[in-house]
Image (cartoon, grey):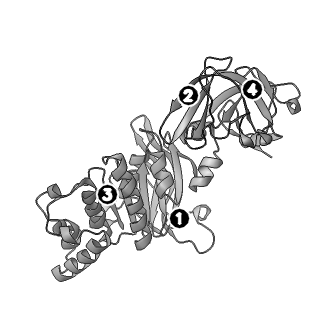
Amino acid sequence: MTPSHSQSTEPSTEHKPSGADKIALQTDGLTKHFGDLTAIDQTSISVNQGELLCFLGPSGCGKSTFLRTIAGLETPSSGDIYIDDEVVTDAPPYDRDCAMVFQEWALFPQKTVLENITFGLKVNGVDKSERVEKAESLLETIELQAHRDKYPSELSGGQQQRVALARSLILNPQVLLLDEPLSSLDKRLREQMQIELKRIQEKFDQTMIHVTHDQEEAFTIADRIAVINDGKVVQIGGPDEVYKDPNSLFIETFLGDTNIVTAKPFDDSAKGVEVPSLGESVRVPESHSKSDNTGISSEREISISLRPDRLKFRTESDWNTVTETFTGKVTDVIYRGKDVRYYVGTRSDTDIFIDRSERTAPDIEEGEEVTVGWDVSDALYFTPEGDRIENV
């Protein structure tokens, strides 16, 4: 049975961007079910022309299904997909102005680099001389001119990845979809290819949607990041925005290491909150909840996120910014190459950890009694449901 979709051929106006931004792709209420499993849940996004948007989320969250549905490799259960303002929800993959680079790259082993890159143009009936001319130009851009007549087995992993990318770029798609194309590369090569991918994207002004579970990769290459969990885009924004201003406890813990402590507000919330694990009372800013606007209630525990780079030792020079403190004993000092991590024991079973650059790490040893502090505005606060409590 063919799923029913909206009959409108124009995207709903609530998803149109303001100003001169041109939308290359958008989804409107996109949903995909596999039996009782909802892989994509009523998701609406817009991607601007020339933008690199990263789908970032844990394994199994629906990000690859989202990409495959945009490409036409999966049929949505409901909702619509628009590419360049045209509805393509029921169009086959070959009738959508998009191309896809898979995790495995899927190069033809019996074809040369040049033949792999020109394959799509050949299928589309483009004259050979034109195919070769376009391929030669791309080979220069990806710096593989000297490898044009080699076979994939003769190339490194990074070179194969560039060939797969060029094979899609030569088709000049409105949207290029990338399904974790760097995941099989080793760490050093993956980092090099992240920079190369961003350089190529900017050179061609190519709209890209890049799927990854690697936070560092997303922060390196993305113009915007769409954090996906349980089939939903739970926050979308620039890398700085989603990291510094997370709207939920899930995003705060997913995007980096942090310390989470629970706290019970006093009857008079202006006095602050009691943090049993630290054995201290600490203040909180005047606050209200983004989700229900009820603020901090004395009847419910809240969660406080204390990021390890924001915590300070009393011995450090910037201690004058500290407003809240607790004391404890250092249980471990771990040298991790570029940084040092200190674990400080608290009254609970969970230690608080503090990170310092290797160059600025204080001379503190295991077993030492320390006082740790932070500025009240550096902590982030969340309701029992995981919603952000905004500082005002």
Residue 56 seen in the figure: no
Q: Which residue is mark 4?
A: 326
Q: CA distance from mark 1 to mark 2?
A: 55 Å
Query: Which amino acid does the dot numbered 4 rest on?
Result: Phe
Outermost residue on the left side: it is 110
Q: CA distance from mark 2 to mark 3?
A: 43 Å
Query: Which amino acid does the dot numbered 2 rest on?
Result: Val
Upstream in sequence: badge 1 or badge 4 = 1
Q: CA distance from mark 2 to mark 4?
A: 18 Å
Give the residue at x 45% y 59%. Answer: 81
Residue 151 seen in the figure: yes
Q: Secondary structure at mark 2?
A: strand
Residue 333: image tag? 2
Picture coordinates of residue 191, whole percent (x, y): 39, 53
Seen in the picture, residue 254 relative to 211 is either above or below; the reply is: above
Q: Secondary structure at mark 3?
A: strand
Residue 214: image tag? none
Q: Nearer the viewer, mark 1 or mark 3?
A: 3
Picture coordinates of residue 275, whole percent (x, y): 74, 24
